[in-house]
Amino acid sequence: MNDVLIVSLDKTLSKRLKSALEQSRIGPVSEATDTRVAIEYVKQQKPSLVVIDLFLPGTSGVELLHKLKQNNDCHVMLITRVRNRHLLERAYRYGADDVLVLPFSDETFLSFAFQRVGRTELAPQAKA
């Protein structure tokens, strides 16, 4: 299965990413706004891909990434609005598969998502 978990407090971003994934027939897509919920979801559901907004309350997306990668075999993509070299280096060191810096197009996001869930082309309705 191509389950995806989106972890973000930004409802607009979550809705946009979820819509792009579902229109491209990747899913089911679940959402979490809390790191504890995200960790439990990954343990139970074992999604193919976890998309994490870098800035989360209580812990950073990089810390959540680190926790997820310690005990789970899932792909993790970080989304950020900040271009900070040290933060990006840390994200890759902790096991991020991809880091996308906003703004980016849905097509760019989907091309990375497809790589992680084993798909190589856009579904017909996702093409512009």
Image: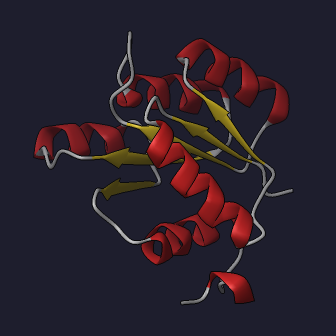
Residue at (75% x, 64% y) in the render: 26
Report how many numbered discs are placed on residues in the image: 0
Residue at (20% x, 37% y) in the render: 87
Q: In which quarter of the image is the C terminus?
A: bottom right
In the picture, measured across the screen, residue 82 lies left or right of residue 53, that is: left
Q: Which percent across, then down, holds residue 42?
A: 72, 30
Q: Can residue 116 be seen in this view?
A: no
Q: Which of 63 and 33 is in front in this view?
A: 33
Q: Is residue 10 visible?
A: yes
Residue at (53% x, 75% y) in the render: 111
Can you say whether 116 is above or below 45 in the image?
Answer: below
Can you say whether 96 is above or below 10 in the image?
Answer: below
Q: Of all residues shown, which one is farthest toward the front? A: 12
Q: Which percent across, then down, holds residue 91?
A: 33, 40
Q: Name the colouring of the figure.
A: secondary structure
Q: Which percent across, then down, holds residue 105?
A: 39, 72
Q: Nearer the viewer, residue 128 or 98?
A: 128
Q: Which percent across, then down, holds residue 9?
A: 46, 28
Residue at (65% x, 25% y) in the render: 71
Can you say whether 95 is above or below 65 in the image?
Answer: below
Can you say whether 32 is above or below 122 in the image?
Answer: above
In the picture, measured across the screen, residue 92 lies left or right of residue 52, that is: left
In the picture, measured across the screen, residue 34 lies left or right of residue 22, that is: left
Q: In which quarter of the image is the N terminus?
A: bottom right
